[in-house]
Image (tube, rainbow, N blue to C red):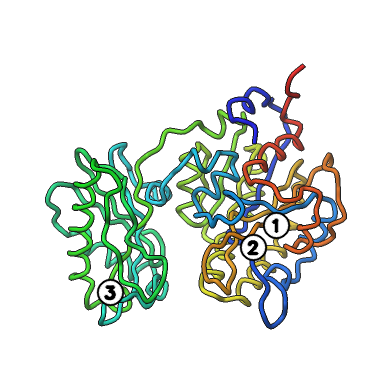
Amino acid sequence: MIPMEELQKLVKTTPSKIVMLVMDGLGGIEHPDIGQTELEAAQTPNLDNLAKDSICGLSHPISPGITPGSGPAHLALFGYDPIKTTIGRGVLESLGIDFDLHKSDVAARANFCTIDENGLITDRRAGRIPTDQSSKLCEMLGQIEMDGAELHVVPVSEHRFVVVLRGEGLSADLEDTDPQSEGLAPLEVKATSQKAAKTAALFNQFANKAKLLLAGSHPANMMLLRGFSQMPDIPGFSELYKLKSAAIACYPMYLGLSKVVGMQTIKCANVQQEFDTLASVYNDYDFFYVHIKKTDSHGEDGAFGTKVEEIEKIDSLLPQLTALDPDVIVVTGDHSTPAQLKGHSWHPIPLMIYSKWCRKDTVHEFSESSCASGALGNLPAVDIMPLAMANALKLNKYGA
């Protein structure tokens, strides 16, 4: 990848428009009964037609073999080095719900979960309890009295919520309590630096009190903490690319991520509204990030067929996007979430870039197996934004 500071020198302003459609968790692996991934099993005539006029390939969010989290995967899509630039999930969730996060706050993304009589996790997401139920539980947890810090417990969506500690001398150098697997007990918060010892003790104090309060609240009778983080200091997306950018999403974390990099955020209630919103604000911006969440959620739930249906729904809405005639359309995912694995995976993600200037290849359908033969080959996700900018004629040449 070209260093960010060098890329920034090449950027020029033009009237062309870029739409980046990100289907979260898009990639999959073959179902043993049918020999196809979710994307390959889906009927996607509109995505396939777009692929015929695009250049295609597969992308790696971090590096081959490395399973990415949603935060670093999206940073890579936006052209930021995901190794050098880190934004914790707690910050992203907090900003996504418009929480007034202070520079010294430590925020954690939290899940309600289910534990059995032995204290072992049986469901990391507590059956995806409805938001109104989790909101009541968050209100209860927010009454916990802490010794040494101010506590904020704020609902996000379904089983997800945010825990923020505010006080002096706090550090986010902490390990998660989520073991990332069922059949195991929640972990203790551990400090990864000496300066975080106080903060670890505070979060453990909260977790122990929360466990007692939640004991009778099945299926949400425990909670997990991860993504401890504080506000980062990174260059803005608009500053880097000279783009007036809009993020259109339903789920708060992705709105939070977009806010961190300086995009204007527009929250929607569902996928149809996202596509309608894109059309309604199309004249106001020159870069659009449109995020689809449920492809990932269905993968995490192991719901192969439902993920197929979600992909087909997106395909049916794609003509609303193409009718706008953007100069560049990027379609991809942030990572793979195969239903068989019920979680993120290291598998590369299908990618296509459409423009009138792209060198078309022989790919005639949008799928993992077809994109594997595309002219883009296997490329790092951080290279996608420079390619989009080039196809929008927004980059000057490098050197004399």
Position of 279 with respect to 130 (left or right) is right
C-alpha distance separating marks 3 and 2: 33 Å
Residue closest to the eye, 211 or 285 = 211
Give the residue number, with chain letter if any, for mark 2.
27
In percent of width and height, residue 376 lies at 77, 48
Residue in the picture at 55% in, 34% down = 237
Residue in the picture at 23% in, 51% down = 200
Give the residue number, with chain letter if any, for mark 3.
221
Check if mark 2's residue and mark 1's residue have beta carbons within 8 Å: yes
Give the residue number, with chain letter if any, for mark 1.
350
The local crowd at label 1, few if under 14, some if 14 to 19, many if 20 or more residues have their Cα within 10 Å, is many
Mark earlier in primary sequence (2, 1): 2
Residue closest to the eye, 73 or 110 = 73
In percent of width and height, residue 186 lies at 30, 67
The local crowd at label 2, few if under 14, some if 14 to 19, many if 20 or more residues have their Cα within 10 Å, is many
C-alpha distance separating marks 1 and 3: 39 Å
